[in-house]
Amino acid sequence: MAEYWPECADWDETLHEFFPVLDRMIAQAVLMEGISREARDDLADELSGWQDEVTEYGADGAFAVAIAASAQGWDEPGLGDALAGRARVWPPAGKCDWLDGKLTAARLAALEAMGRTDHFLNLSKAAGRHCDHAVMLAKCERFDEAIEIARARLRDPDDVLRLAETLLEKNRRDVAFELGVWGLSLPPEKTGNGDARMHGGHALARWLRVQAQAAGRPDLAITAARAAFEESFSREDFCAAKDLSTAAEWPDMRAALMRRLMDADYAHDRLDILLDENLIDEAVAAVERKRGDFFSPYDGTLMRLADVACARHPDWTIGFAFRMANPIMEEGQSSRYDLAARWLEKAARAHAATGKRDEWRTRLDALIETHRRKHKLRAFLESLRKAG
């Protein structure tokens, strides 16, 4: 890969994504049993050469973990004590930088692959890798210990998900579900400046929703579905909650989800959901609240809104359509004149909906006169006059 990197770096923007994977795989491989000290030294030299080559093309530190694993192996001072359970902290200084953390992860992966479970548990405990430690305990069927570690130490829902998946694989479904529900209740962690970060429980909530539904646990599935939507505000999660709700449950669930959706500072699928639910007034109001934001004239959801709002909010539709079309026409974006015409068609229908056809013809004639020198645009505008 390093050999071909220079000739590929200028055109393949995704190739760099393979370096962390390759780095991790080489680091784990060099730590396996049967690799001699001499072989590791030779590989460290070769990797350093590769690193020098790819650094020139922006791949700094591409083989940092593999080089460290080759150079240090299992000989790092104090590591033997950590593996044997005689050290309470790893690294001995108590501080762990990025490279230390990646090297410890590679060592743990190698220990697991070699079946050295006791050494894995000792090192993960000393390194404070609580999720790795709890997952290994679960794999060893030491379930009570794993749950105890989780409730005492795990604060990231993604870590809870890893353990819950392991418990399910070990046929401890009820325990996995109970842990999943607990994970969704974890409060958001604080950032360095004291602000609450995003909770991050979306993957856990989706997993719990799917698994609970498969297990015939509808109450748990709908609870997880609501949690998933409140994390993502996505159309997919809204539809999942709707599908899981009974006809009697859905009105209250819908109202609760809509309240959260409308209160959200950001929700990519907000308009799609509102339109799916035929909440046209709310969709128009949502756009108006973001009036200072940039709206792309290519946005299909906005076009859909303009189409359905035409009858109930004709004046708004007219204003919004011109807001989308005017910059294209005024800036002479000839490649997008057809897009401007599509928006003006919506303005024409809104004028017709309120019986203002004469007003539309007057505005259209004014546009044709204003842009008379833009021959391509003028052709589009005159076609609108024929259509009207």
Image (cartoon, rainbow, N blue to C red):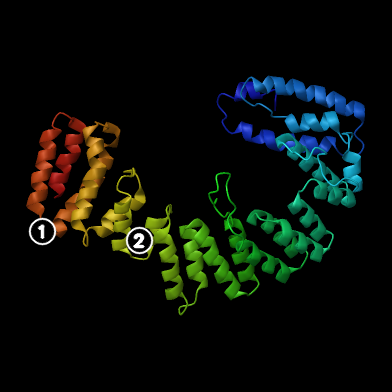
Task: Name the image quarter holding residue 283.
Answer: bottom left
Q: Nearer the viewer, residue 295 or 88?
A: 88
Q: Position of residue 337 (x, y in %)?
A: 25, 37
The disc label shown at residue 355, or none = 1
Residue kind at label 1, given as amino acid type: Gly
**Label 2 CA crowd tier, 10 Å (few <14, some 14–19, many 20+):** some
Determine which quarter of the picture holds residue 264. bottom left
Query: As drawn, is 343 to the left or to the right of 367?
Result: right
Q: Nearer the viewer, residue 384 or 233?
A: 233
- First in sequence: mark 2 vs mark 1: 2
Q: With 126 as the anchor, is 372 left or right in this view?
A: left
* Mark pair 2, 1: CA separation: 25 Å
Q: Is residue 72 above or below residue 211?
A: above
- Which type of secondary structure does the marked residue at label 2 adopt? helix
**Which residue is identified by label 2?**
275
Q: Position of residue 122 (x, y in %)?
A: 86, 49
Q: Residue 33, percent across and down?
A: 91, 39
